[in-house]
Amino acid sequence: MDHLQLFGKIVAKRSFLCVGLDTEVEKIPSFLMKYKDPVYEFNKRIIDATHQYAVAYKPNIAFYECYGIKGWISLESTLKYIRKKYPGIFVIADAKRSDIGNTSKMYARTFLENMAFDAVTVAPYMGEDSVTPFLSYKNKWVILLALTSNKGADDFQYHNEDGIKLFERVLSVSKKWGSVDNLMYVVGATRADMLKEIRKIVPDHFLLVPGIGAQGGNLEEVARYGMNSKCGLLVNSSREIIFADDSRKFDKIAGEKAGEIQQEMEQYLAERSLI
Amino acid sequence: MDHLQLFGKIVAKRSFLCVGLDTEVEKIPSFLMKYKDPVYEFNKRIIDATHQYAVAYKPNIAFYECYGIKGWISLESTLKYIRKKYPGIFVIADAKRSDIGNTSKMYARTFLENMAFDAVTVAPYMGEDSVTPFLSYKNKWVILLALTSNKGADDFQYHNEDGIKLFERVLSVSKKWGSVDNLMYVVGATRADMLKEIRKIVPDHFLLVPGIGAQGGNLEEVARYGMNSKCGLLVNSSREIIFADDSRKFDKIAGEKAGEIQQEMEQYLAERSLI
């Protein structure tokens, strides 16, 4: 999928919502615990209830890896379910991996080949040869951390050399490694004020924006400062949607919550005449 | 295990060698392929042949994750084997994880609680709240990336604010998050010239040093510039030991290779009067 095809999906769904499947067993409604794989059963229902509002799903690998072999089975089953039932949807492995070249190659194989995700999130600290093995896959994407949504982003990401902050350097250096069709960036919604500067460096790249909802980011600001002529945004919401309710109606409520966000997104797309 | 206990193990074995278990199925001697779990059979023989020269083992998680559920079984079996047969050995999950706080918590649980590694490598880009969840485990270690051994280290790790390079900032800021008993740093052997500067910032912390052998780093220089009064070094070698030979005698040759490195290490420890 290239960036124009991704934009096509956004137009078709009138949404740039990515639903984060950060499924913690402890938070799953108790009636699902009777199933063999409660995480999968939970995800399936969340996906069925939200797919019409979402252009992407993003399981965070930590929440699966944590349950060992069982967790990997839940993850693979979830991916297969999306592929089979909703084949057009963009699926991101939020793994934040990276290592020296021959090791990053193994991580790339895991997520982009063996598990066939469309994209994987990658940490930039180790530089070019830690990232490029992920970029060697056709029609696959690297989503590189630039400016993250957490408080700790202040510790190193603003480290400033001659007026250039580290995250700005990550953007300007790394954009040469790939193209607008295989490289996007993580920019936290909690840093919406920086989106104007970021758009000067990467005007045409897609941005994956976590942090609305539970983390306090504001969708309206993200759209105002981050949207480009091909939308250029995937905005992620996890807990706010998937754990909106813990009763038997959790999926219905999750769907309603996703629908509300989609409605707001549709408005911003319309204001920019993108739909 | 605190840093004095780790030093005690170094003294006892007259070695600060960490053997990297970066086991690629493609490189395993063919006679092992008849076993149900060739990766585990390979690791077991490597461990038996090298344990008297090694104070630590470091499986890089990428090489296991890549084989899906089978890979995780190989990893768990390997860890159990070390725990049972050689209980005093320090075992590091080379995972290079990190994420926002509630997610790092899950990664910490995976490696330090569920799998009971002694230590996990962590990437610093996302700052304090991405690292501290790993530090909340008693008698466990975070090994934070500072200056890595690969070429890409030049891209961002030297980003220089008022004379302070990013990796130096990582050291000086992060050392407040933990202590010499639960925090060490990755410094590539290929950057031995920087060890003098690094020791000014973290004189007493242990350093995990990858990159001797295949990657071109020099053990003598690492010892000269990096060793402190409690040794303060774990030097890793992976490919140079475990893939030194691919015949039926691969384990014997691996043991000899590890023995050679131990001999050299013993000499540097003796020169410093640490043994």
Image (spheres, coloured by chain):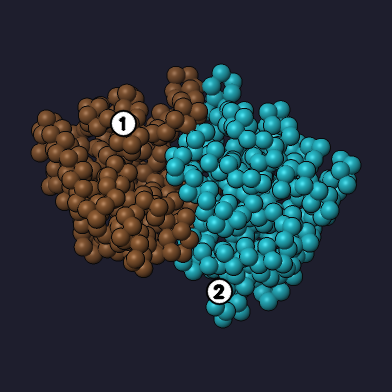
Chain colours: A cyan, B brown
Question: To which chain does the residue with label 1 belong?
Answer: B
Q: Is residue A131 left or right of residue B109?
A: right
Q: Could you say which quadrant of the image residue A258 lies in? A: bottom right
Q: What residue lies at 46% left-to-right and 39% top-to-bottom?
A: A101
Q: Is residue A182 visible?
A: yes
- The residue at the far bottom in this view is A34
Where residue B43 appears, x then y in whole percent? 30, 57
Tell me the number on the disc at residue A37: 2
Q: Is residue B253 left or right of residue A217?
A: left
1 and 2 marks in contact (CB < 8 Å): no
| Label 2 residue SS | loop
Q: Is residue B41 left or right of residue A78?
A: left
In the depicted structure, whether residue B267 falls above or below residue B2: above
| Amino acid at pointer 1 | Gly
Tell me the number on the disc at residue B217: 1
Q: Could you say which quadrant of the image residue A86 lies in? A: bottom right
Where residue B140 appears, x then y in whole percent? 32, 52
Q: What residue lies at 53% left-to-right and 39% top-to-bottom?
A: A131
Tell me the number on the disc at residue B156: none
Q: Quadrant of the C terminus of chain B?
A: top left
Q: What residue lies at 66% left-to-right and 55% top-to-bottom?
A: A91
In the depicted structure, whether residue A153 falls above or below residue A10: above
| Label 1 residue SS | loop
Q: Is residue A59 left or right of residue A101?
A: right
* Callouts 1 and 2 in the same chain: no
Where residue A230 appears, x then y in whole percent? 80, 40
Q: Is residue A152 visible?
A: no
| Amino acid at pointer 2 | Asp
